[in-house]
Amino acid sequence: MLAFVVDDDADARGVVSNQLHALGYKVVQFIDGEDILVVAQAVRPSLVVTDVFMPRGDGIEVLGAIKKLHPSCPVIAVASTQEPLTEAFLGILGQLGADATLIKPFGLSVLRETIRKTGTVEQLPGFQ
């Protein structure tokens, strides 16, 4: 199963990517929303984990485009607690179609449970 991780913060992107690897995903990383949208036109991911606040192509654009291209692909939107109105904004993303939302930082067990709730983990060794 293939996961796309989108975050302009290299450390955060690396942590989430490593967590997904540990759960059995193959991961492709993107530094912004613009880059993922090009690739997503040709490749269907099994899961997308996207930061919300990015300078080029924010999480709203990523969410909308992924849901248009691949309606059944789960999208998890994440944001940092350092950003204003984070919880309210994540709630709005849920209304716009995000399958789940998380506030950074989060651990592997939280990510695992969030992915489990999206229903996309049947074949992954990290969920057995």
Image (cartoon, rainbow, N blue to C red):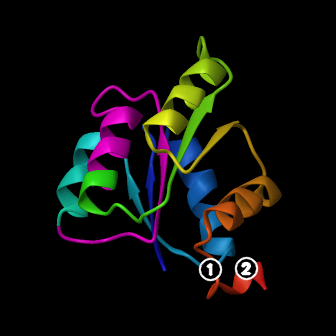
For residue 120, side relative to residue 46 (left or right): right
User: Is any atom of residue 32 visible in this view?
Assistant: no
Q: In the image, residue 77 lies at what x, y percent? A: 53, 42
Q: For this rendering, which residue is in front, 65 or 72?
A: 72
Q: Is residue 101 above or below residue 28?
A: above
Q: In the image, residue 24 lies at what x, y percent? A: 62, 80
User: Callout 1: few (<14), some (14-19), or many (20+) C-alpha neighbours within 10 Å?
Assistant: some
Q: Which amino acid, by three-letter code, is at mark 2?
A: Gly
Q: Is the residue under label 2 in contact with that under label 1 (CB below 8 Å)?
A: yes
Q: Is residue 119 above or below residue 53?
A: below
Q: Is residue 7 above or below residue 17?
A: above
**Any mark on residue 24, and which?**
1
Choose the circle earlier in sequence order: 1 or 2.
1
Query: For the magenta stretch, what is the residue range?
Result: 42-66
Q: Which amino acid, by three-letter code, is at mark 1?
A: Gly
Q: In the image, residue 102 lies at what x, y percent? A: 66, 40
**Any mark on residue 126, and which?**
2
